[in-house]
Each structure stands twice: as structure tokens, then as C-alpha cells.
Image: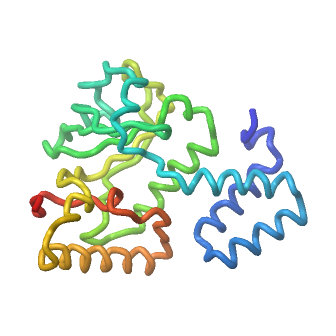
Amino acid sequence: MRGDPSVDPQFAELMELFDACCDAPPDERAARLADARARSPQLARRLQEMLAADNQPLFLDDARGAAQYLPGLAEQRVGGRWRLRDRLGAGSGGEVWSAEDAETGEVVAVKLIHPGLVDDPLQVARFRREFATMARLSHDGCLRLIAEGAVGEGVPLLDPGRRYLVTELVTGGDLSRLALAPAEEILPVLVQLLAALDHLHEQGVVHRDLKPSNVLLTGEHPPP
């Protein structure tokens, strides 16, 4: 299988370069790509493909994609703890559900990797990278990470290899909802956003897809 580390001699080097490039500023990334191209054009081409794919959101909040996924997942329990309730969105990378924590009663968000990507080690690595990145963040303006894992055996309709992320559920819509809000209302939100971005940068994380639809609001921000 392409990308399988057991048969792909470039896999380890490719993943090492990918991780380094993701965290690197543009000039350093360009230098690493040039070095890879000089040593192995094939390696450089695969690296560029991965970096281009990584620039796309892993989970797209596009309900139009929901039709391609099984509707019978509701009430299934992921990780033995989180009972799926309502599908919130779906896209090329996976689907997002609201779920109830059987231990605490908290309503959370569960992100499931697309079933077609379960056997793609590069996509699984990217999914786990999202978890590792989120785990480094600790700020009120950043989504709270709760857990990550593989579904495992005993869950009907779900491949045991499908990976999931559990995060807090944010229900206030996104920043575009405040487009017509008066300045005195939007400015405090932007100050919070800048503080969260500052925390990301302190942790060596660059968002790379910052736009109103990707900035989630809590319920304390009513529409104008």
C-alpha cells in the first residue's frame, strides 16, 4: 500500500519532513522543499501534495455532505463513553456529531474521520496531528480538547479503526454572524480572538485558515 511504512522506504522521512514544514515559517519551508527536491524529486512531490492537502480544513461544516454518511450512527457509543446524538456537519475529511458524555452528562462534539480514510496512514497521521496540536493549547479562546482515540470493536456501523476527537461543543455560530454588529459589540470579540491567536503563536502554531466562518462563538454573543 502506498504510504504504508512497512513497504514504503520514504514514509518515515516524508512524515518527518511534513511535521517540520507544517511548523516552519514560509522561508524555512521553502528551503526544506528545495533540499528535498534536490535529493529526491519524488519525495518533494509527495511532500508538496501533503502540504497542499493540509491547507484544507479537516472537517468541513457543510451539511450538504451529510447524505453520503450512514444515518444509523445516532445513539452509538464512541469510546465506551460518548453517545452520538445529532450530526452537525460533514465533509471530505469526516463528520462532526454532538454527543452526550455518559460519565458527566456534558454535551460535547465528536469528530469522526471519514471511513474511506481509515486505511490511509497519511490521513490518519494528519488526524492525530490535529489532536497533538490542540493538546498544546490552553486558553479560554481555544477549543477545549477532551479525548482522542480509535472507535475499537463492538460499535455497530463503525469501523474499529476509525479515529475520533472529542472537544467541547460551541453553539453560538461563527464570527460572520456579527458582521452587522455595532463596533462596541464586535471589538471585545476581536480582542479575545487576538489573545487566542497570540497563544497559538506562543505555542508555535499557525492557523493558516483564519476567516469568520472558522471563528466559533459561545452563546454569550447574541446576533445583532
Residue at 41% over, 65% down: 210
Q: Could you tell me residue 43's position as x and y percent?
A: 81, 54
Q: x%, y% of residue 163?
A: 46, 39
Q: How is the image coloured?
A: rainbow
Compared with residue 47, is residue 179 higher up or lower down, i.e. above or below? below
Name the side, left or right, on which 166 lies relative to 222. Answer: right
Q: Tell me: 189 left or right of 124.
A: left
Q: Who's the residue at 23% across and 46% down the image?
A: 108
* Of residues 40 and 174, the one drawn nearer to the viewer in this rendering: 174
Look at 30% across and 79% down and name the residue there: 195
Q: 150 or 85: nearer the eye? A: 85
Quadrant of image for the C terminus: bottom left
View extreme (front): residue: 180
Percent across and percent down for residue 45 are 79, 53
The image quadrant that residue 151 belongs to is: top left
Is 18 placed left or right of 185 in the picture? right
The foreground one among 218 and 104 is 218
Residue that extends furthest to the right in the rendered view of this protein: 39
Number of dots carrying numbers: 0
Q: Position of residue 203 (x, y in %)?
A: 45, 76
Is 11 drawn above or below residue 29 in the view shown?
A: above
- Check the picture and name the quadrant holding the N terminus: top right
Task: Work out whether residue 139 can be spotted.
Answer: yes
User: Residue 154, can we see it?
Assistant: no
Residue sitting at 61 percent across and 77 percent down? Answer: 25
Determine whether, in the image, residue 189 is placed left or right of residue 214. left
Residue 135 higher or lower than 163, as above or below: below
